[in-house]
Image: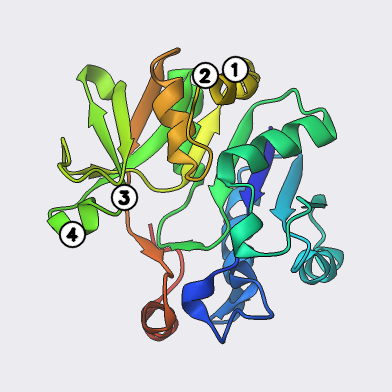
Amino acid sequence: MKCLILAAGYATRLYPLTENFPKPLLKVGEKTILDWLLDDISSANAVDEYIVISNSKFYGNFRDWASSRRLPVTVLDDGTSTNETRLGAVCDIRFAIEKLGLNDDLLIIAGDNVLDFSLTEFLRYAAKKGTSCTMRYREDDLKKLRKCGISEVGENDVLIGLEEKPEDPKSHWCTPPFYFYKREDAAKIGDAIADGCGTDAPGSLVSWMCRHTVVHSMEMPGSRYDIGNLESYEAVCRNYKGITK
């Protein structure tokens, strides 16, 4: 299994902190955000390569970070240098697959989220289901729902649909940016884009995928801390206690 880390964004809402430094490498406690994620995932011994998809602006930062890691980390430059010219998450995934000739199951994660639970539980869930999988958590705040990818889930956790940032959410299930794609489903990304799949938000690929194959949705066993602005970053730095579940 390969782990693709989406890290080509510019985090403009965190300026000036991220004006010349990538958000995934900001520290929370004694580790960077990215180290929290990879140290946890590596404990499952299921991933044989970690692939960080960066942009030209922060490529050097990630290369320097990767050189200090003992894990097999590859850093890619998607060739963009501004927020206005970014490829979007789905095109970045396709870029990595084509650049490296990937033909494997993929764990795809956003590199700027902090979790208080282990993602190894998600990997076990995906292995048990034998399908591509997402996660979900309940959110009751309508304003927050309108800013998320909203899942519709049927019997036995089957994902029926996903809509990005709907004005009228069809459920209370939010979908965080952590996805498992079986090899044969990951190979369909070109078809998805050609079919009109949105390319900015990674959830758009899930939305297309669940209409063309079986996708399951695991209820998150803990909490996710999205670092969207300076205030939320400062709060996470104050309150985060590591993986406790």
Can residue 45 be seen by looking at this rendering? Answer: no
- As measured in the structure, the alpha-carbon distance from the residue carrying label 2 to the one carrying label 3 is 23 Å
> In the image, what residue type sits under mark 3?
Cys
Does residue 65 appear to the left or right of 7 in the view shown?
right
Q: Amino acid at mark 4?
A: Lys
Closer to us: mark 2 or mark 1?
Answer: 2
Rounded to the nearest whole Å, what is the CA distance between mark 1 and mark 3? Answer: 24 Å
Secondary structure found at label 3: loop
Question: Quick check: 162 left or right of 227?
Answer: left
Graded by Cα atoms within 10 Å as few (under 14), some (14 to 19) or many (20 or more), the crowding at tag 1 reads few
Residue 21 at what x, y percent from top left? Answer: 67, 78
Question: Circles 2 and 1: CB distance less than 8 Å?
Answer: yes
- Mark positioned earlier in the residue sequence (4 or 2): 4
Displayed quadrant of residue 156: top left
The image quadrant where one finds the C terminus is: bottom left
Q: Is residue 34 above or below residue 88?
A: below
Comes first in the chain, label 4 or label 3: 4
Label 2 is placed on what type of residue? Asp
Q: Nearer the viewer, mark 4 or mark 2?
A: 2
For marks 1 and 3, the one nearer the N-term is 3
What crowding class fits label 3: few (fewer than 14 Cα within 10 Å), some (14-19), or many (20 or more)? many
| Picture residue at 57% right of the left edge, 45% below the top | 89
- Residue drawn at x 55%, y 47% is 109
Provide residue 206's location: percent of width, then percent of height.
Answer: 44, 30
User: Residue 195 got which mark?
Assistant: 2
Q: Which residue is mark 4?
A: 143
Q: Which residue is mark 1?
A: 191
**What residue sits right under mark 3 in the picture?**
148
Q: Are marks 4 and 3 in contact (CB under 8 Å)?
A: no
Q: Is residue 47 visible?
A: yes
